[in-house]
Amino acid sequence: ALTFDDGFSAQAIQTTLEILRANNIQGTFFVVGTQLEAYPDLWQQAVADGHQICNHTYTHTYLSSLSGEEIKKELARWETAAGGVLGEEYVERMKQEFAYVRFPGGAGHNNEEVLKAVAEAGYRPIAWSQDTYSAVLKSHDLKNEAVAPIADEVRQYTVNTAQNGAIILLHFNSWDTLYLEQIVEDLTKKGLTPTSVSKVLD
């Protein structure tokens, strides 16, 4: 499964949409609610292209720092934002067919109160099996180093560690998307078909 998080860079979102469309790939996007509102046209295009847009909270607050009620409010605020940008029908369909949530920073996966609140709100948590941020990006000085060599490291890591059933975590940023075309090509050469979370879990 090819998954992308957050949505802070319009350029990275656009690049991702173009490459996935050209290769006829549908992915799963965990978008922060504030960023849904920031780039409505791009997310509407994403849904038109067949991608799944799922809950990543409204403000990207770590759920382990919130009470059960506050967690439900974060998820509900995201739904309100998604309803405004993508339409109420989309939110209803998402809740019925792919009610996925990704915890910001992965915080709360081992916390019973978080898991209970998320389940009560009707969501299924989706983690990942490989993550370019912890494996590659966090060891670099992203403000001062050139993008291309880091992006190539991201490409190598993603392709080398990918296997059948993997959930790949990328972000809408320049390091993860610069060589996305090559990543898709290399995964395909490896005999893997990049797709959505639903297709992997079904």
Image: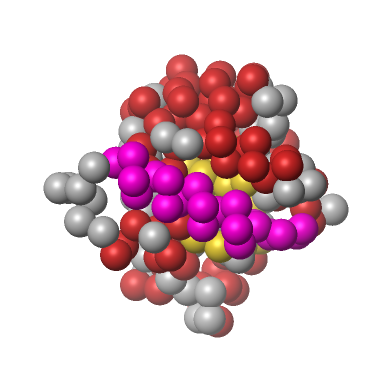
Q: Residue drawn 65% across and 57% down?
A: 162
Instruction: Check if residue 129 falls in the magenta segment.
Output: no
Position of residue 189 measured from the top left corner of the image (x, y, whole percent):
73, 42
| In this rendering, position of residue 163 left or right of residue 180 | right
The residue located at (50%, 47%) in the rendering is 155
Main SS of residues in magenta: helix
Residue 46: x %, y % from top left: 57, 25
| 12 vs 131: above or below | above
Residue 89 image-quadrant placement: top right
Where are the magenta residues, as a range? 147-167
Q: How is the image coloured?
A: secondary structure
Residue 152 x/y as whole percent:
42, 46
Please identify the quarter of the rendering in which residue 196 is found.
top right
Can you tell which quarter of the image residue 195 is in?
top right
23 over 111 or under it: above or below: above
Report whether 31 appears left or right of 126: left
Residue 17 place in picture, x, y as percent: 54, 25
Residue in the image at 64% along x and 42% along y: 186
Asked whether 153 or 108 is in front, the reply is 153
- Along the viewing direction, whichever of 176 and 9 lies nearer the viewer: 176
Above or below, 19 relative to 140: above
Residue 184 in view, yes or no = yes
At x 36%, y 26%, the residue is 11
The answer to whether 67 appears left or right of 200 in the picture is: left
Front-lying residue, 137 or 48? 137
| 101 on left or right of 72 | right
Residue farthest toward the left in the current orientation of the protein: 144
